[in-house]
Amino acid sequence: MQTATKNWLERNAILIAILITILIAYLSIDSNPIHVPIKITNLDKILHFSAYFTLTTSWFFALREKNKKLLIIISLILYGILLEYSQEWFTTTRTKDMYDAIANTTGIVIAAILFKYIYKYYKKIFA
C-alpha cells in the first residue's frame, strides 16, 4: 500500500502542485471568502501562511530533481503578490492586504527552509 501511494504521489506531483496553485487562486479571488465560525486572532494570516507553505512544499516536491528552488521561491512570492492585487482588481468584496502578502512570503520561506527535513521524513515513511 505504501509503495502504491508513493508511486502515485511521485507520478502526479506536478498535477497536485498545479491543482493547489489553482485552488489558492480561486480562494484568493472568490467574492465570497470562507467564513470560519471560530474566533482566532489573525486566523486569516495563519491560513495564508499554511496555504503558501503547502503550495511551496508541493512545488519543491514536484520539481525536486530539477534543483529550481530559487525560481520556485521567487515565482511563488510574485504569485502571492499578484493574487493580492487581483482581489482588488477583480472583486468588489475583497481588498489587497500587504500583511497577507507577508504571511504568504513567510509560508514560502519557512517551507523552503524546512523542505529538506520534510523530504527526508517522506523518504523515511515510504522506505
Image (spheres, rainbow, N blue to C red):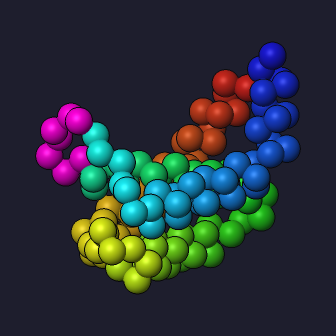
Which quadrant of the figure has residue 94? bottom left
Q: Residue at x 39, y 63 (%)?
A: 31
Task: Give residue 58's position: percent from left, percent from top.
Answer: 62, 51
Q: Is residue 32 above or below residue 72?
A: above
Which quadrant of the figure has residue 117? top right
In this picture, residue 70 sits left or right of residue 77: right
In this picture, residue 104 sits left or right of residue 8: left
Q: Is residue 26 magenta?
A: no
Q: Is residue 45 above or below residue 118?
A: below
Res. 17 in view: yes
Task: Give residue 7's position: percent from left, percent from top.
Answer: 84, 34
> In the image, which residues are magenta?
37-43
Task: Give residue 120's position: percent from left, percent from top.
Answer: 63, 38
Q: Which of 124/21 is in front?
A: 21
In this picture, residue 64 sits left or right of residue 85: right
Main SS category, magenta section:
loop
